Image (cartoon, rainbow, N blue to C red):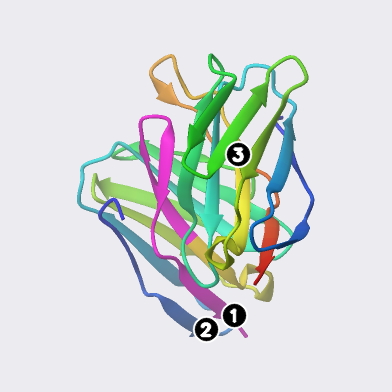
Amino acid sequence: DAGITQSPRHKVTETGTPVTLRCHQTENHRYMYWYRQDPGHGLRLIHYSYGVKDTDKGEVSDGYSVSRSKTEDFLLTLESATSSQTSVYFCAIGRGDTQYFGPGTRLTVL
Amino acid sequence: GENVEQHPSTLSVQEGDSAVIKCTYSDSASNYFPWYKQELGKRPQLIIDIRSNVGEKKDQRIAVTLNKTAKHFSLHITETQPEDSAVYFCAASRGNYGGSQGNLIFGKGTKLSVKP
């Protein structure tokens, strides 16, 4: 499983509250990614990182921010959660051309 | 930008039959094409991949073919078994170029059901 963990695994929150999801890797990979998965949309890239403090936007970045202060941790923050951000969030690491996914976080925004 | 279309969205086969899932991509610079399998409630897992310098790759009962001219690639599963039931995603990327890693663009997925 490429040494990737995500926390929390499940979260229920209310509209307007801030939420931070954490992705942790143990293999020192340079590239890390955050995706969201919704029925009918497949996997869509939110943000990615190519090193400590180096991040860039993906396809669906509005309403999300990220930070990477250490190689092993990539944080995804919803500054003010909305119901449209209810989704399953997957973190991934890049190893060569290939990406390997974490176990996912199911987020529900009421 | 890059777009990946995947068909069909659902596929039902009898155990022992073959299943074929097709994807087309728009970026002619794409050179890396992985396939992921996702079981219910689990993470997507890489099952096979192919690079643009190869036309076909096999791994036991699964194979992937690539037609660069037509910009499409396909996943073939032979002798399907109930445990093959899952959602399958194709993806495309430019791979590693200029020292950076190309981002994956995913198809929307195919739900495969294998009936015993």
What residue does disc 2 label? A13
**Mark toward the viewer: 3 or 1:** 3
- Position of A89 with respect to B111 (left or right) is left
What residue does disc 3 label? B91
Q: Which residues are magenta?
A: A90-110
* Position of B65 relative to A29 (above/below): above
Q: Distance between the Cα atoms at labels 3 and 2?
A: 32 Å
| Residue A80, x across and y down, in percent | 56, 70
What residue does disc 1 label? A109
Crowdedness of circle 3 by 10 Å Cα count: few (<14), some, many (20+)? many
Q: As shown in the figure, which amino acid type bears the numbered disc 2?
A: Thr
* Position of A3 relative to B116 (above/below): above
Q: As shown in the figure, which amino acid type bears the numbered disc 3?
A: Ala
Q: Does the magenta-highlighted stretch encompass residue A101?
A: yes
Contact, mark 3 vs mark 2 (Cβ under 8 Å):
no
Residue found at x 61% / y 53% = B88
Q: As shown in the figure, which amino acid type bears the numbered disc 1?
A: Val
* Position of A53 relative to A14 (above/below): above
| Residue B96, x across and y down, in percent | 44, 22
Contact, mark 1 vs mark 2 (Cβ under 8 Å):
yes
By secondary structure, the bulk of the magenta-drawn segment is best described as: strand
